[in-house]
Every structure is written in structure tokens, then in C-alpha cells.
Image (tube, grey):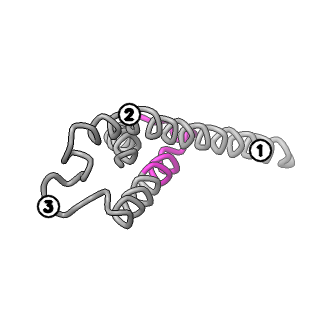
Amino acid sequence: MCCFLTPMAAAAVATVARKKFPEKLHAGWLLMMLWGAVVALVVDHAINGEISVYPPFLTALKSPEQTEIMLREIAVTGTAMTVAVFAFWGVSVAVANIRAKTARGNQPA
């Protein structure tokens, strides 16, 4: 219903703070992963009719029962997906930094 709101919030915060990231953390990678996930999820929810172009934009806000389900989905599914993106980014950065360190160590003196 709205699981894209959690990675969207993380992407917004990371976008604002990107200049504070050290170069070796590849903030651009994180931003691409987060915003890519948001776009994919928005498209998925739009195709499934869970987002409308008129208020309330989220169809789950039309009834209290659906709103409760929506909030649970944001908290559980959205958080799990955001954590997965951060984990994948962390592994990618670690591998890239190890490879860069190894490449520097193999250069002739």
C-alpha cells in the first residue's frame, strides 16, 4: 500500500546529507539504490491501483481499517526493504574498498 514511504524518507535524508559522506562510502550508490527502489515501488503500487492522482492519493486512507493495515505495512515491509537496501549498499562498498585496497597493494613499487 505505501511501503515506498520508508525508503523515500531514507532517500530524502541521505540526499540532504550526501555531502557529509566520505568519498569511500560511495553515497551516490546508496542514493541510486534508494531512489531506484522508490520509483519501482511507486510504479508497482500505481499499477495495482493503490495510488490515485486525486486526494487522498493513497487509496488506503479512504477507510480506517485500511489505514491501519497501511501503517503496519510502512513499519514492517518498508523498514525491511530499506534495511535490505542499506545492507546491500554496505556489502557493495566493503567489496569495492577491499578490491581498491588490493589493487593498490599489487602495484609495482
Query: Mark 1 sits on what residue?
Result: 104
Q: Is residue 69 visible?
A: yes
Of the numbered discs in the image, which one, if any, rests on residue 72?
A: 2
- Stretch in magenta: 20-34
Classed neighbour count for the residue bearing mark 2: other residues with Cα under 10 Å, few (<14), some (14–19), many (≥20): some
Q: Nearer the viewer, residue 37 or 74?
A: 74
Crowd around label 1: few <14 · some 14–19 · many ≥20 (10 Å): few
Q: How many angstroms separate mark 2 from mark 3 (CA)?
A: 23 Å
| Disc 1/disc 3 C-alpha distance (Å) | 55 Å
Q: Which mark is residue 54?
A: 3
Query: Residue 98, located in which quarter of the rendered image?
Result: top right
Instruction: Determine the residue positioned at 14% across, 61% down.
Output: 54
**Left or right, residue 81 beside residue 87:** left
Indicate the amino acid at tag 3: Tyr
SS at badge 2 = helix
Q: Going 63% across and 42% down the picture, which residue do you hit? A: 93
Amino acid residing under circle 1 = Arg
Of helix, strand and loop, which one carries label 3?
loop
**Residue 46: percent from the left, percent from the top?**
34, 63
Q: Earlier in the sequence, mark 2 or mark 3?
A: 3
Residue 17 percent across, percent down from the top left:
35, 37
Q: Nearer the viewer, mark 1 or mark 3?
A: 3
Q: Is residue 91 magenta?
A: no
Label 1, label 2: how far apart the Cα atoms are: 47 Å
Q: Is residue 18 visible?
A: no
From what the image shows, is residue 36 above or below residue 99?
A: below
The location of residue 100, given as percent across then percent down, is: 72, 45
Residue 30 part of the magenta-drawn span: yes
Mark 2 belongs to which amino acid? Arg
